[in-house]
Image (spheres, grey):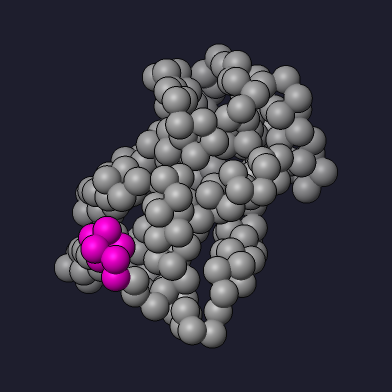
Amino acid sequence: MGVMTSPASDSLKEIHMRLDERVRAMDEPRWLASRYAAEADRTALIVLYAFYYELARVRVAVTDQTMGQIRFQWWRDALNEIEQGQLREHDVVQALADQIAGARLEAPTLTALIERHEAAFLEQDRSLEPEDLLISVAARCLDPAATLEKPLADIALEWAALRRSEARTHLLPRQKIAARIRPALAHLRLRHLWQQDPNPSALKTRLSVLMAMLTGRI
């Protein structure tokens, strides 16, 4: 189901480092934004994104619907076992258990991500993937009281569509976000850059995320 690890041989710090490297390789925009968070906040974001990647990769790993459902059920079972004090030997499971214990992440919300990813997989419709829910969960990692209005959810879905190289004639209006949650949403500013240049340079990408952090406008 993913990269396996032995809790006897790998410390939590080593697991976090490995997940950080994985997220950077697979999801650099979100990884860049997470660099602006405090260490504990950054760790929570990276664990969340590593979990999200495990769900997203089901679409790539299998085409058979039954096999896909088995994989999603594996993650449901893993979350249930965490709540019962049992941990599977999987690096993301180990990291999730730590974040759930620290109340940074909640199993019911993570299960909702599974459900929506599974629905997108079964419908073979990536527009159903829960990018909007993901930014909401990420924001609450940084500020438990954070609530995101619908315009931000729509922007997250638009960002995901542009990332999939889906054309957009007009972008949704920019929104201002609170400083506390910017590391969870700053990457969404990249939609403006991607509309102009689908393959921007690394420098332009970093500058876009930086501007989001400085201005709060995405």
The x, y position of residue 101, in whole percent, is 40, 54
The span shown in magenta is 80-86
The residue closer to the viewer here, 171 or 139, is 139
The x, y position of residue 215, in whole percent, is 72, 20
The residue closer to the viewer here, 105 or 202, is 105
The x, y position of residue 146, in whole percent, is 46, 25
Residue 108 among magenta residues: no
Asked whether, in this view, residue 156 is left or right of residue 184, the answer is left
The x, y position of residue 27, in whole percent, is 58, 53
Asked whether, in this view, residue 80 is left or right of residue 178, the answer is left
Residue at x-position 47% and y-position 71%: 91
Residue 85 among magenta residues: yes
Determine whether 109 is above or below 8 in the image. above
Can you name the residue that lies furthest to the right here? 203
Residue at x-position 47% and y-position 79%: 7
Question: Looking at the image, can residue 142 be seen?
Answer: yes
Asked whether, in this view, residue 40 is left or right of residue 103, the answer is right
The residue closer to the viewer here, 118 or 165, is 118
Question: Looking at the image, can residue 167 be seen?
Answer: no
Determine whether 126 is above or below 193 in the image. below
Q: Quadrant of the N terminus?
A: bottom left
Determine whether 164 is above or below 175 in the image. below
Residue at x-position 50% and y-position 55%: 47
